[in-house]
Image: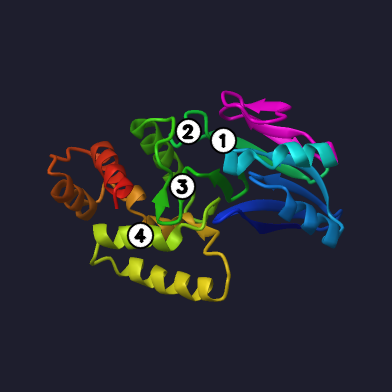
Amino acid sequence: MSITIKPIPSLTDNYIWLFINTLNSTAVIVDPGTSAGCENFFEQEKIRPVAILATHRHWDHVNGIEQLVKKYDIPVYGPATEFIPCLTTPLTENERIRIPESGLDLQVMDIGGHTAGHIGYLTGNKLFCGDTLFSAGCGRLLGGTAAQLHASLNRISQLPDDTVIYCTHEYTLDNLRFAQAVEPDNQDIQSRIDEVKALRANNLPSLPVTLEMEKRYNPFLRTSKKSVMLAVAKHSGQQIKNSEDCFRYLRMWKDGF
């Protein structure tokens, strides 16, 4: 099997990810907030879509589903506890799904917090995490709780360091500016800023990124670090007793940044 993963830009800053099996020219679509970019790509490249994977219910991840199902008559996989248009296969934690036409074998991860029922898809060392984890950031609390999102990020951080993170927004530079406010002496943040500026200057995505890299500069994966705890305590005026406290006030700080 030969798999290529391609981002399709969507809306202002979304990415729709395509798993493309180059041997049989099939594709699995992840989080199609729109349909036109996918349809144009499939027509130009003579690719046949065979399934849609949704991570959560937000419109910028699901609004293209109905049109794609209408045109291609393909199944839709998504979280069992959220409304996903045209959902055919509701999924919960630790389920494994196989999409025979593409050869994909995926494990479902419960990574709620951004929304309560948010899920991710893990295949090999690749994680499709929707809006739970961003490069240098994480999702807002839009239906889930801080404790839930903190636990989800901890689950992700325990995956192997070579896990490749495919998130769905080009927020990286803005997130890095916040990360630098939290840890101004962290040289990995400046290195990543320089790298991302060069990529974006050439109209290239800053994604995907490895988990090992994210652990160096993403403050939301560093809430047990003394430098982050001290910065959050100073900014919030609160006593930070543990990583979860740190995460809660860090998320509030970012919301107003």
Q: Which mark is residue 249?
A: none
For label 2, the residue is 115
Magenta highlight on residue 99: yes
Give the spatial CA distance, label 1 vs label 4: 26 Å
Please report contact status of discs 2 and 1: CB closer than 8 Å, yes or no. yes
Q: Amino acid at mark 2?
A: Thr
For label 1, the residue is 56
Which mark is first along the chain, 4 or 1? 1
Crowdedness of circle 3 by 10 Å Cα count: few (<14), some, many (20+)? many
Q: Position of residue 147 (x, y in %)?
A: 34, 32
**Residue placed at 40% from the left, 56% from the top?**
136
Magenta highlight on residue 93: yes
Can residue 216 be seen here?
A: no
Describe the element under mark 3 as helix, strand or loop.
Answer: strand
Can residue 182 be seen here?
A: yes
**Residue placed at 25% from the left, 51% from the top?**
225
Closer to the eye: label 2 or 4 = 2
Q: Position of residue 108 (x, y in %)?
A: 60, 34
* Position of 63 relative to 174 (above/below): above
Which mark is first along the chain, 1 or 2? 1
Describe the element under mark 4 as helix, strand or loop.
Answer: helix
Q: Is residue 44 left or right of residue 180?
A: right
Which mark is first along the chain, 2 or 3? 2
Q: Amino acid at mark 4?
A: Tyr
Crowdedness of circle 2 by 10 Å Cα count: few (<14), some, many (20+)? many
